[in-house]
Image (cartoon, helix red, strand yellow):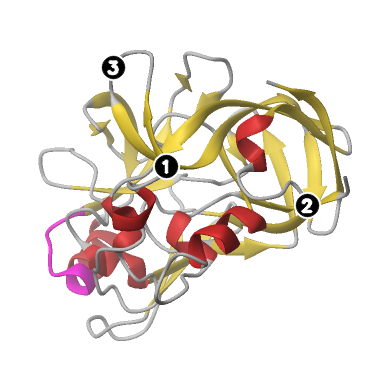
Amino acid sequence: MTVVVRELNVYPVKSAGGTPLTGAEVLPEGFRNDRAFMLVRPDGRHLSQREVPRMALLRPSYDGVKLTVEFAGTGPDGPLVHSASGDGPVLDVTVHGNPCQGVDQGDEAAGWFTAALGRECRLVRFTGRRPTKVGGTVKFADEFPLLVVSVESLEELNSRLDEPLPMNRFRPNIVLEGLGAWGEDTVRTLRIGGVELELVKPCARCVITTTDQETAVKGREPLRTLATYRTLVFPDGDRGVIFGQNAVPRALGTISVGDAVEVTRLG
């Protein structure tokens, strides 16, 4: 089978829109600059599209120095252009109740995001280290460094829907073509050039997948349809509606759209 990389995406601000890439540097925490920033409530809890669907309208890009965020809705005048700060106050914050820390990025950034979302919040930049239970690290990602999905899985799902959905509903880092529908479920390790990834756990999907990433309008799909045939009971007894595989880098390097992918182990 011939498998290739079709899309690469990074998400500089957790739960905001993604930035498509032609090439990405793979680090222990996933793609460079992925989930480097996060919006938090006054009590330090992370803000997400689960509660604020308008976050889908945030369009960030980050070059490691400057964070630029366009907003596709009504709110602030003009984009935010922010020089990332590493020496502001360090705040204790949480991601799904898990403690971590972020450097506060100041009142100007906080005011811009508050105006865009209509919700008091502050922008923080990740600091410290968050190891995962299966190796690798994350910044403000939920639990794993990378999310891998296949083109054919989306095509199979769309064949069951009244209206097809774009891939951005699932917010993947790496989109592969050639594995076949749900082929990512059967892969344990794969190699892209010098980069090796281990696919460690199916990704249980949340209500963010029901938010249109272009309009922030919420619906019922794809969870309603996926639940009829893609529900999995995990070893700990939890149930989840599955789409895609969480992955951990085992060998690091750079990958690009169009790269050939070698499946090195099934499992």
Question: Marks 3 and 1: CB-CB under 8 Å?
Answer: no
Q: Name the kind of residue labelled 1 in the image.
A: Arg
Q: Which of pointers 3 and 1 lies earlier in the amino acid sequence?
A: 1
User: Is residue 175 visible from the viewing direction of this image?
Assistant: yes
Magenta-tinted stretch: 115-121
Tag 3: residue type?
Answer: Gly
Is residue 253 shown above or below 114?
above
* Residue 108 x %, y %: 27, 64
Foreground residue among 197 and 210: 210
Disc 1 and disc 2: Cα gap in Å?
20 Å
Q: Look at the picture and state if 80 lies above or below 101.
A: below
Image-based side of 14 in relation to 47, left or right: right
Q: Secondary structure at mark 3?
A: loop
Kindly state the secondary structure of the residue where label 2 is placed: loop
Q: Quick one: SS at disc 1?
A: loop
Numbered mark located on residue 178 in the image:
2
- Disc 3/disc 2 C-alpha distance (Å): 32 Å
Can you tell which of label 3 and label 1 is closer to the viewer?
A: 1
Task: State which mark lies toward you, 1 or 2.
Answer: 1
Q: Is residue 163 above or below residue 129?
A: below
Disc 3 to disc 1, C-alpha distance: 16 Å
For marks 3 and 2, the one nearer the N-term is 2
Residue 132, x across and y down, in percent: 48, 19
Observer able to see residue 139: no
Label 1: which residue? 230
Indicate which disc, 1 or 2, sits on the residue closer to the N terminus: 2
Describe residue 109's horizontal placement relative to residue 251 as left or right. left
Magenta span contains residue 117: yes
Within the magenta stretch, is there residue 107?
A: no
The numbered dot on residue 237 is 3
Residues under numbered marks 1 and 2 in contact, where contact means CB atoms less than 8 Å apart: no
The label shown at residue 136 is none
